Image (spheres, grey):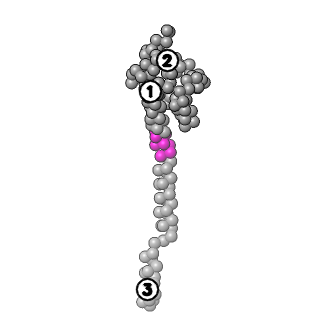
Amino acid sequence: MSKNNRNSVNNKSKKPSKNTAFGKLMCSLVILGVVVLLFINYALPLLKKEVSHMAAEKTVDIITQNADKIAGDNQEVKKAIESMSDEDKEVVTEIIENHMDAKTAAEVMGYVNDGDKEALMKFAAENLTAEETLELINIAGKYADFTK
């Protein structure tokens, strides 16, 4: 074998094989796929829950800030909304969170901003369970006497 042939044979064996590059690419894609699946199955639901809870808290804050619009002429309702304890606000937040999605959040916030009590009451009657309605009535009863 001549010297030129030996050099060309040695150079060919130093090149990476196509199978190795393809194998690395496939391994990388499999790892990326596993990471994406883990994110979708575990992290995404946690993020959705946290975002939903934050949106519900913001809704309760806006309702508290707009107590005048919601209460209208009824000062008892305004007083009840403004003087709610943190524990009761958390209960209201959980009830809102159970029914929160983008459509209902926008709908309810529109009612609050417009001061449309009738639409809020209708929405609550259609969407809240009997237990949730009773819980809200009990909370309202703590802060205002509606029997007058």
Please report contact status of discs 2 and 3: CB closer than 8 Å, yes or no: no
Q: Which kind of residue does numbered mark 3 sit on?
A: Arg
Picture quarter with the N terminus:
bottom left
Q: Nearer the viewer, residue 5 or 23?
A: 23
Q: Which residues are magenta?
A: 39-47
**Residue under circle 3?**
6
Q: Position of residue 96 (x, y in %)?
A: 50, 28
Disc nearest the viewer among 3 and 1: 1
| Among the two numbered marks 3 and 1 on one chain, the one whose residue lies closer to the N terminus | 3
Q: Which mark is residue 109?
A: none
Q: Nearer the viewer, mark 1 or mark 2?
A: 2
Q: CA distance from mark 1 to mark 2?
A: 15 Å
Question: Would you name the residue on which mark 2 appears?
Answer: 74
Q: Secondary structure at mark 1?
A: helix
**Magenta segment includes 43:** yes
Q: Above or below — where is 129 with respect to 30? A: above
Indicate which disc, 1 or 2, sits on the residue closer to the N terminus. Answer: 1
Q: Amino acid at mark 2?
A: Asn
Q: Is residue 50 visible?
A: yes
User: Are the two marked residues, 1 and 2, in contact with CB atoms closer than 8 angstroms?
Assistant: no
Task: From the image, tell me which residue sits under label 1.
Answer: 64
Q: Could you classify mark 2 by the number of other residues whose Cα lies within 10 Å: few (under 14), some (14-19), or many (20 or more)?
A: few
Q: Secondary structure at mark 3?
A: helix
Residue 89 lies, in percent from the top left, at 43, 25
